[in-house]
Each structure stands twice: as C-alpha cells, then as structure tokens.
Image: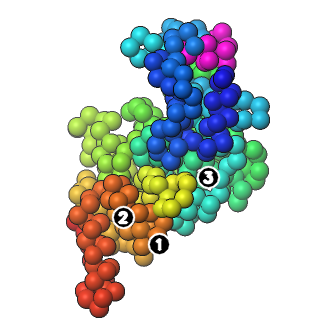
C-alpha cells in the first residue's frame, strides 16, 4: 500500500488523522480511537519513502534543516490533508489530518445559535479554544463561511498551513499561508492592516506578539477571529494574560474587557449509538456583568456568571454536556469523561431526575 491507499481508508472511515511511525503499524483515528490500517510494521526507509515522495525539494530541505515541517497536501479524488512531519527517537514520524473540502454550515455542526451571531459582529475579538483535535479549525471555518455568505467585506486569513479553502462569495477572501504567501507570521501580522481588511483570522495564537496583534486588530475597529489552546473559557482568559509580564496583567484584562466579544470553548464527544462525534460547547459573551469581572481580573467569577446567563446565550461545558445527555445524543459515561467537574454534572442530572419524580427543581441552580 502507498500513502494514497492509506488516505483513501482515512476518508472512507471518516477518520480524523493518519499516523505513521517507525516500528508501528499505520493507524488512523476514528471517533477518537486508534485503528490499524495495515499489519505491516513501518521501517525507517518505508516511512521516509511514503512521505518524501509527496514533498518537493524545498519542503524536504526545510524538514531536514529544522527537524519539523507543517504543510498542506492535496491528493486528487481524495482530498486535502494537513501534514505534521517530525522526528522521534531519531526516526521520522508523521501525522496527516483530514481537511474537509466543503465548508460546513454552522447549523450542521450543531453549535449554539449564538455562535452564528458571533460570526457576524462588526468589531471585537472572538476566540475558539480547545485541545488539539477538538474541532476548533472546523468551527472557525464555518464562522468565516457564514460571514462570507451573508455579509460583504474583505476577509484576510493568516494560516500555517491553510486548511479550508474559502471561495470569494459576498466577501473577498484573501488566505495567506505562512512560508508560501508570507515569510513569517510576524510579517503577515504587521502588514495585515495595509490590506484594508474587515475581518481578520489568525489560525492559531501561540505567541505574545500574535496576541498583541489580535487585541490591536479589535481595538482598531476590526473583527478578529482566532484559535487558542485552552480547555475552557476561564483558562483561555488566563492563557491570554500569561503571554505578558505580570506587571502588564491589569492592562491586558482592561483591554480584553473592552475588546473581547466572546470565547467559544469546544471539545468532541462520541455520539451515542452511532458513528461520529458531537460538539460540546462552552460560550462566554462579554455582557456588562462579564466586562466588570474581566476588567477586575476576577476569573473565578466567570464560570458562575455563565451558569446564570443561559438566557443571554452563555453556557458552561458541563451545562452543554447535560443538555446533550438529556437529548440522548451522548452516553452517561462519555459525558462524565468530558466534564469539567463530574460532581457538578452528576448534580445536574440528579436534580433533573428528582424533578421528574416531583422533587426539587432545577430553577436557579448554580453549580460551583
């Protein structure tokens, strides 16, 4: 089997990733679980051959000089994949993530309607956060797709690499890939405002400089969307300020209180009784009450406020899990595994069951 055969299997099984490592069998991740594609144990030469035949000389040189490579690969009749090539134990390893060729609709992803509203705000900072493989890029692509379809303007994206391809619809979409369309992320960020954008997407914020630009873009009247690695919205706020020296934290909280529009935290849970996974989403909106907490750096008050603000569109991870469990979309065990607090989620479920039996009510319940 060659690399295309492996990738055809990935597409057929709707797997998210293909894993190639010396001494291991070629594997793919299906609904979060590893599944072997072939029985062969990959040798160094075999692993190298599978990948190198798909790279050009510049990419091979970059990998051998930097020991890392990130790029997008396209295969006719199969699709696009994001390649991360690396060394481990002095041997080559590779992960190829499948990229859907169709921009998903937000409604098809099952996200709360408030996420669609966030995609249409005129100015501010909107972050989609989660762990690797939590679907952040897919949600962000759907948000850009929604804006592209229903509004006009210039959308500039800075990605490493480009994943979803956006056609020009109601908007002009300029997608810039680091290393191909710009020498560096920093160069792209510094020149973005000269491109007269209305919406700016930063594929992932990893550095203080990228975070500074994201805040600055929102301060100057643009909508800036970006992803960030964080498990929930409270951790996202802490992660943002952690980019900066301790002495600047109060200033950053003050800037966020003015410019942040919302944070969506996401994780994926297996769908009950069928293939596929369900998006679990926590939503923070910068309401006047939230603005006050963020300005004062009262991060411990963020979650309780979200729990009490369902009517405004906010919800916590555990409340989202509770809703999905009540609808029969996820199992009890999977809900517990994904919970921020198993005790909080158990309490919500128990109170609901007691209410069905004529006992206590859920009204006004705030889990801590």
Label 3, secondary structure: give it. helix
The reply to whether discs 1 and 2 touch (Cβ–Cβ < 8 Å) is no
- Disc 3 or disc 2, which is closer to the eye? 2
Main SS of the magenta part reads helix
Instruction: Give percent across and percent down for residue 148.
Output: 69, 52
Separation (CA) of disc 1 from disc 2: 11 Å
Specify the quadrant that holds the C terminus. Answer: bottom left
Label 2, secondary structure: give it. helix
Camera-nearest residue between 335 and 55: 335
Q: Quadrant of residue 296?
A: bottom left
The reply to whether discs 3 and 1 touch (Cβ–Cβ < 8 Å) is no
Range of residues picked out in magenta: 47-59
Instruction: Give percent across and percent down for residue 32.
Output: 47, 45
Q: Residue at x 44, y 40 (%)?
A: 132
Camera-nearest residue between 156 and 86: 86
- Please say whether residue 51 is one of the residues in the magenta stretch: yes
- Disc 3 or disc 1, which is closer to the eye? 1
| Label 1 sits on residue | 327
Neighbours of disc 2 within 10 Å: few (<14), some (14-19), many (20+): some
The reply to whether discs 3 and 2 touch (Cβ–Cβ < 8 Å) is no
- Residue 142: image tag: 3
Separation (CA) of disc 3 from disc 1: 24 Å
Label 1, secondary structure: give it. loop
Q: Is residue 118 visible?
A: no
Looking at the image, residue 182 sits to the left or right of residue 304; the answer is right
């Amino acid at each position: 089997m060659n690399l295309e055969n492996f990738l055809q299997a990935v597409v057929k099984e709707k797997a998210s990733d293909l894993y190639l490592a010396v001494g291991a069998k070629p594997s793919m991740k299906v609904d979060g679980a590893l599944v072997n594609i072939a029985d062969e144990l990959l040798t160094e030469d075999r692993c190298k051959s599978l990948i190198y035949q798909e790279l050009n000389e510049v990419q091979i040189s970059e990998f051998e000089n930097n020991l890392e490579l990130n790029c997008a690969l396209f295969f006719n009749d199969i699709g696009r994949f994001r390649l991360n090539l690396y060394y481990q134990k002095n041997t080559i390893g590779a992960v190829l993530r499948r990229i859907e060729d169709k921009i998903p609709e937000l409604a098809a992803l099952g996200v709360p309607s408030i996420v669609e509203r966030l995609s249409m705000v005129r100015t501010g900072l909107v972050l989609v956060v989660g762990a690797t493989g939590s679907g952040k890029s897919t949600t962000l692509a759907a948000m850009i797709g929604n804006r592209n379809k229903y509004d006009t303007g210039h959308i500039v994206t800075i990605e490493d690499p480009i994943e979803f391809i956006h056609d020009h619809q109601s908007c002009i979409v300029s997608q810039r890939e680091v290393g191909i369309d710009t020498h560096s992320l920093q160069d792209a960020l510094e020149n973005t405002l000269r491109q007269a954008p209305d919406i700016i997407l930063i594929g992932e914020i990893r550095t203080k400089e990228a975070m500074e630009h994201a805040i600055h873009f929102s301060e100057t009247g643009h909508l800036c969307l970006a992803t960030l690695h964080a498990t929930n919205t409270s951790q996202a706020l802490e992660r943002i300020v952690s980019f900066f020296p301790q002495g600047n934290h109060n200033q950053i909280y003050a800037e966020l209180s003015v410019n942040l529009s919302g944070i969506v935290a996401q994780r994926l849970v297996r769908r009950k009784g069928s293939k596929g996974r369900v998006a679990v989403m926590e939503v923070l909106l910068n309401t006047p009450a939230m603005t006050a907490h963020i300005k004062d750096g009262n991060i411990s008050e963020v979650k309780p406020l979200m729990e009490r603000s369902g009517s405004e569109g906010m919800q916590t991870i555990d409340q989202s899990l509770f809703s999905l469990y009540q609808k029969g979309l996820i199992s009890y065990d999977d809900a517990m595994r994904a919970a921020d607090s198993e005790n909080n989620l158990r309490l919500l479920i128990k109170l609901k069951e007691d209410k069905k039996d004529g006992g206590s009510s859920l009204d006004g319940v705030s889990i801590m």
